Image (cartoon, helix red, strand yellow):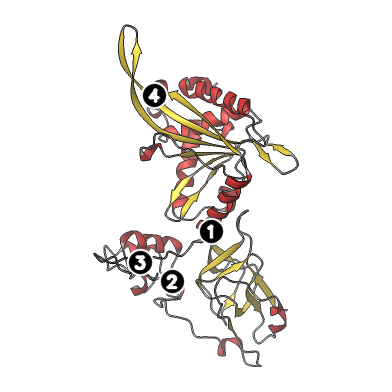
Amino acid sequence: MAEVIRMPRLSDTMTEGKIVSWNKKVGDTVKPGDVMAEVETDKATMELESYQEGVLLYIGVEPGNAVIVDGILAVIGKAGEEFQSLLSDAPTSTAAAAPVAAETTAQPVATTAAPETPAHSDSRVKASPLAKKIAEDKGIDIQKLTGSGDGGRIVKRDLDQISTMPAAAPKMASVPAISGTEGYTDLPLSQMRKTIARRLSESMFTAPHFYLKMEIKMDAAIEARNAINAISPVKVSFNDMIIKACAAALRRHPDVNSSWMGDFIRQNHHIHIGSAVAMPDGLIVPVIRFADQKSLSDIAAETKMLYGKAKDKKLQPQEFSGNTFTISNLGMMDIEDFTAIINPPDSCILAVGRIKEVVVKKGEGFAVSNVMNVTLSCDHRSVDGAVGAAFLQTLKGFIEQPVTMLV
């Protein structure tokens, strides 16, 4: 019997997914584990695998169109099997879909399948997400390439052999900015940007934020990091040390490690630290799970791996969900201090600025010291001012004397 393939919920915040490309066409045989399509969610571009075996009878959404969660994507069944009765729940997309279906006749489905679109077609570029990212970074027109992967799919090795090619023309309508004339470019919203806008708007206008700022002396942390990196198997960053210090402080202040649930407050017993990463489409927050139970070198290795996967849009749902506290660090971009919007379902987020040198009085003279500004944004529904301040005092102690968070 034919089965409907629906858009799965690939992240806890996902409401719709956009089809990037189909790796199968109508009439193809599909086996469990086959990658049918690539789907752009609000967090990453992910591969959609089949759990059924049969023939692809119907494709309900063309590449570039989005479908709500549980909307119809495709139908798999036996060659020539009737499936129109299964389509009463039509897919809901953000643009008009152009379904591709096999005719229901006694002939095998393969004889009536729509011809496969070439790999270089404007609307059906067949390429892996990594290959598309490399092409974008190198300014390569991926539409002019012929892939060496299955079915002409463009993969990483096809891009590695190319140094430069003329960049593809922009696909969005724009007016050139000529001297004396006005111009603009309309940028389409990615699934990630849509979700960021929705969730942070909800957070800002539903959670009563208040902000606590503190200056932390970093001289001992700098010395400790140098000593740690002399023996650590992986380079430890200041952000890794802040993650560890926050995890240790949360263990002492469980009220901060909480979530507002509407009619009750959920105090989490586990500590999962989200660490925001900037991407071209917006922010994504990889999560270091059970951070309080991990060494600095373990945290450093895990963050490096997660940040790499985030930039390649390869994060899996369990790697960007479940946070109980979030850190947003803009210090590497020379930002001295800022305030951050709370990342639901957390009650707090820590904004971290750069380490800077200041002149301080020391004895009868003056000396140079290194300081860092942090700002804790708190949801006043679940965290009071005194609770947030006590957490910051503990955090300050751990960072100013790093050995204390290691014992």
- C-alpha separation, residue under disc 2 versus residue under disc 3: 10 Å
Neighbour class for label 4 at 10 Å: few (<14), some, many (≥20)? Answer: few
Which amino acid type is marked by label 3?
Answer: Asp
Residue 153, labelled with which disc?
2
Q: Disc 3 designates what residue?
A: 158
The outermost residue toward the right is 263
Which residue reaches farthest left?
179
Q: Of 325 and 374, which appears nearest the observer?
A: 374
Q: State the residue position of label 1.
A: 194
Please identify, in this view, whether the residue under mark 1 or under mark 2 is nearer the observer.
1
Q: Residue 257 placed where, x, y %?
A: 63, 34
User: Residue 396, image x and y in percent?
Assistant: 50, 23
Sequence-wise, which precedes: disc 4 or disc 3? 3
Q: Residue at x 54, y 67 (%)?
A: 18
Residue at x 57%, y 86% (from the top left corner): 110
Q: Earlier in the sequence, mark 1 or mark 2?
A: 2
The quadrant where residue 57 appears: bottom right
Crowding at label 3, few (<14), some or many (≥20) Cα neighbours within 10 Å? some
Sooner in the amino-acid sequence: mark 4 or mark 1: 1
> Considering only order in the chain, which callout, 3 or 1, is on the residue closer to the N terminus?
3
Residue 382 numbered tag:
none
Nearest to N terminus: mark 2 or mark 4 = 2
Q: Quadrant of residue 130?
A: bottom left
Disc assigned to residue 227: 4
Structural distance between the alpha carbons of marks 2 and 4: 48 Å
Location of the C terminus (image quadrant): top right
